[in-house]
Amino acid sequence: MKYAYFPGCSLHSTAAEYDESTREVCEALGIELKEIPDWNCCGATSAHSLSHELSVALPLRNLSKAEEMGLNVIAPCAACFNRLKSADMAVKEDPKLLAAITEKSGVKYGGGVEVLSLLAAISGLGDEVVKARVKRELKGLKVACYYGCLLLRPPGVTQFDDPENPMSLDHIINDLGAETVEWPYKNECCGASLSLSKPEIVVKLTHDILSVAKRAGANCIVTACPLCQGNLDMRQPDIAKKYGETFDMPIFYFTQLMGLAFGIPADFLGLKKLLVEPDAVLALVGR
Amino acid sequence: MAQSVAEDRMKISDDICFRTEIENLSGQKIMDCYQCGECTAGCPVSYTSDLAPNQVIRLVQLGQDDDVLKSKMIWLCVGCETCGTRCPKKVELSKVMDALRETSVKRGISAREPAIKIFHETFLRSVERGGRTHEISMLGEYKLRSKDLFSDLILGARLFCKGKLAIIPSIIKGRGEMKKIFGLLKRK
């Protein structure tokens, strides 16, 4: 299986550990990733907040490059995935929009690319494929699988899992031998792009998510999105200051746990880049 | 009396114009909303906003452009898409919010949540310059423009120590293409 790989800006900076662990895990699963040459930012929330045309044109340049490669696209970042897929669908639904963008910006796109999130691609392999790679089960971990928003919604765009009670990530984590908790906040919003401009909102939303995960008995949270991981990981000191509650709950990328279960050395999975140290929790599973 | 009827008619036609403008820009059928409030029940930011999401839709239905374009809500909406996913009439409210923000900028209305708008503008300028975001220069510019110089400095230092912030920006070759693409924004 060969895919055009769209890492996106976060995976080259704040979420470098997601990039590292994605490459390792995909190699182990036989998924070949070929990075889209000279890719550009998808525009994220900021582009669609200020211009619909721009929010479609930015991802389209990447899709047109993937089309030249003759490959479907995998995007690990939930926001990138959502913007790429939204742009693909927007021009398929509205050919006039595509014509206008091509005329004004020169970006051409034939519509021949399928966009997948990394989670959907791995989930699509099936439980047996994942289980077959497991060398050391993660027994002892109690994981709250956090899906957030953009992998799931809007369902007409994402075409993935149940938006109200998603289970695909839970199944993968169970395949690794870890326990998953049932909790009602798996698809709540973390505040995402408000992280810098309205930190007080993000602190409130991430506090709610962490406290529900803790009450459900989780000792860590797993995400498939750099915005979710960043907000939940980075804001724990601010949460402690505001709410007087210290969680010390590690926030992993799902690929990091997959890598650990596959026997990939921790150094290749960027575990040291997490702000909340995962050592105590990983000691529970003998890592 | 006659004059006031004529004025009323003009006002009504303006109201319909605003609604139609937002419908065209968002591709959503605004009049389908029957105010059940499901969008507001699930909204992560309505607790701190001036207007609730269902009130935004109602004001657009009524053509109250001033109230809605000057609201905090259109900027606070983070695009989580919970509202549209749960809407029984399939109105995708986040697309309506996008259309309202775009319209408010086009009309030169100052944002009631300036920091959020400054963040989006700074983010896009970073992408326009290099094709990809460069966090350190973007954060510096954001802090200067928003005059919020001191928050999150410790956090920034922690991210830097973890090797999560690159000093040298990653710049793409297709910057000429970026310039053309960003023409779409500037023409507005």
Image (cartoon, coloured by chain):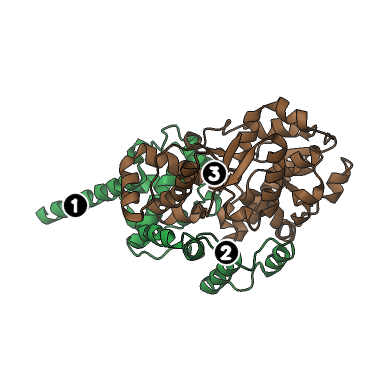
- Which color has been applied to chain A in this rendered view? brown
* Same-chain status of marks 2 and 3: no
Q: Can residue A145 be seen in this view?
A: no
What residue is drawn where x is 56% and y is 34%? A163
The residue to which callout 2 is attached is: B134
- Which color has been applied to chain B in this rendered view? green
What residue is drawn where x is 19% and y is 52%? B8
Q: How crowded is mark 3: few (under 14 residues within 10 Å), some or many (20 or more)?
A: many
The amino acid pointed to by label 2 is His
The amino acid pointed to by label 3 is Phe
Residue A254, quarter of picture: top right
SS class of the residue under badge 1? helix
* Same-chain status of marks 1 and 2: yes
The image shows residue A155 at horizontal and vertical percentages of 51, 35
The image shows residue A263 at horizontal and vertical percentages of 82, 40
Could you say which disc has been placed on residue A81 in the image?
Answer: 3
